Amino acid sequence: MSKTVELIIDGKSYTFPVVEGTENEFAIDISDLRDKTGYITLDVGYKNTGATKSAITFLDGDKGVLHYRGYPIEELAERSSFLEVAYLLIFGELPTKEQFTKWESDITRRTMVHEDIKKILDGFPSTSHPMGVLSSLFCAQTAFYPESLNPNRPADGVYLSIIRSLGKMPTFAAWAYKHAVGHPVNYPDNKLDYCSRFLKMMFALPGQDYEVNPVIANALDKLLILHADHEQNCSTSTVRIVGSSKASIYSSISAGINALWGPLHGGANQEVIVMLENIRKDGGNIDKWIAKAKDKNDPFRLMGFGHRVYKNFDPRARIIKQAADNVLKDLGVHDPVLEIAQKLEEIALSDPYFVERKLYPNVDFYSGIIYRALGIPEDMFTVMFAMGRLPGWIAQWLEMRNNNEPIGRPRQIFSGKVTRPYVPIQNR
Ligand code: SDX
């Protein structure tokens, strides 16, 4: 592959360097395009534009490959744990036994939140969507830890923000749920592991013993691993661009939570279940809903299908589909929407509309079925995605900061009115 490319504009030749990644990806470095040519590029939705160089996650959308720091997602999902994967994503290497013991202890000792968080929580109506509550509680850490606002905070201070984020996220999530259902909140039981502690905060009731089902805790741990990072997706790009203004890690990640909330992104896992339930209530008329998804005059899309990068299969969807089968069998749960999902996938993948557009099930298509089997309510599904994606957001924010990347500020092509004189209101 050549090391440069040539661009000819109005007969004049310009040369730009080619950047090659460690996985044989190639990019044209156009950092000085405007200075050299006066032109910018236009790429609405950044479908062909690299925002950065990153060493964290590698995707190959054509081959259905997903690696975290070089480790295949299939191996990590099978053999690792969420906190170990979080360490890998953030620090770049799998931890030694001693490193992991300290890491887990540091996070466990930061699961409590300030009692004044309850006052913020009480300000939300119980009908609030938990994603809005979560992004507010997460950002409120800037008030309780104002030292986090220092953009030049030393590394040990940044580490403290990292372990606080990972320690408190499950507490914020569980408290948002308890507030929504009108139950008293539960305090974190630090004798338990990360997922068991969260489940107990979510589902324990006053005066009743709560035993965590290890099948549920293990399934949740695997789901969090599968959601932990995904290179420059919408919410991660949001975290990076907010952080590029030297905003704190808490406000950057709070912005990422809000970006993830959208139904085209992390909010899809909740919309998939709504869609499957609608199909079930409609007598399982899958062909009708496939036709709606293909109809350009119908805003309905097959939720949990399609992906900006994966044009073959989403490896996470394959793992989650298998896990859904196993978890429902282990728990003895029969969920009619699982059969509908499997039939929908089968029909869609044989339909030319989906095949031509390379639309396959994505991470959100089956995850909601597992969450439902674990007893997680629908409007908490995207909160679970946020809990999983937290270490990825942290790792990407840290990489952007450690690389001293400039503030993100894209250009535009103006398409509005050209210069015109002001007209007083009496003359309009
Ligand atoms: C996530 O980026 C990431 O990595 C995200 C994520 C992560 O881990 O962070 O993987 C998580 O967000 C997964 C995606 C969850 N969203 C959904 O399931 C919502 C449904 N899917 C889409 O709306 C859509 O597929 C996107 C948003 C995921 C991708 O959209 P693109 O890449 O902008 O593609 P597009 O909208 O330009 O679609 C291309 C064509 C269009 O048809 P034509 O105009 O060519 O005729 O495919 C069609 C679209 O109409 N299409 C669909 C469809 N998705 C795309 N048609 C019906 N149903 C769908 N789901």
Image (spheres, rainbow, N blue to C red):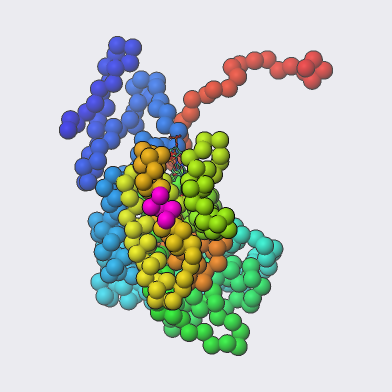
* 143 or 237, nearer to the observer: 237
* Residue furthest top in the image: 11
Residue at left offset 45%, top offset 33%: 44
Residue at left offset 66%, top offset 73%: 182
Residue at left offset 25%, top offset 71%: 96
Magenta-colored stretch includes residue 113: no
Is residue 225 something that shows in the picture?
no
Residue 259 appears at what percent x and percent y?
51, 50
* 207 or 394, nearer to the observer: 207
- Quadrant where the N terminus sits is top left
Residue 348 appears at what percent x and percent y?
41, 47
Residue 114 appears at what percent x and percent y?
58, 72
The range drawn in magenta is: 343-347
- Quadrant where the C terminus sits is top right
Q: Quadrant of residue 95?
A: bottom left
Magenta span: helix, strand or loop, mainly?
A: helix
Residue at left offset 34%, top offset 28%: 32
From the viewer's perspective, is residue 168 above or below residue 360?
below
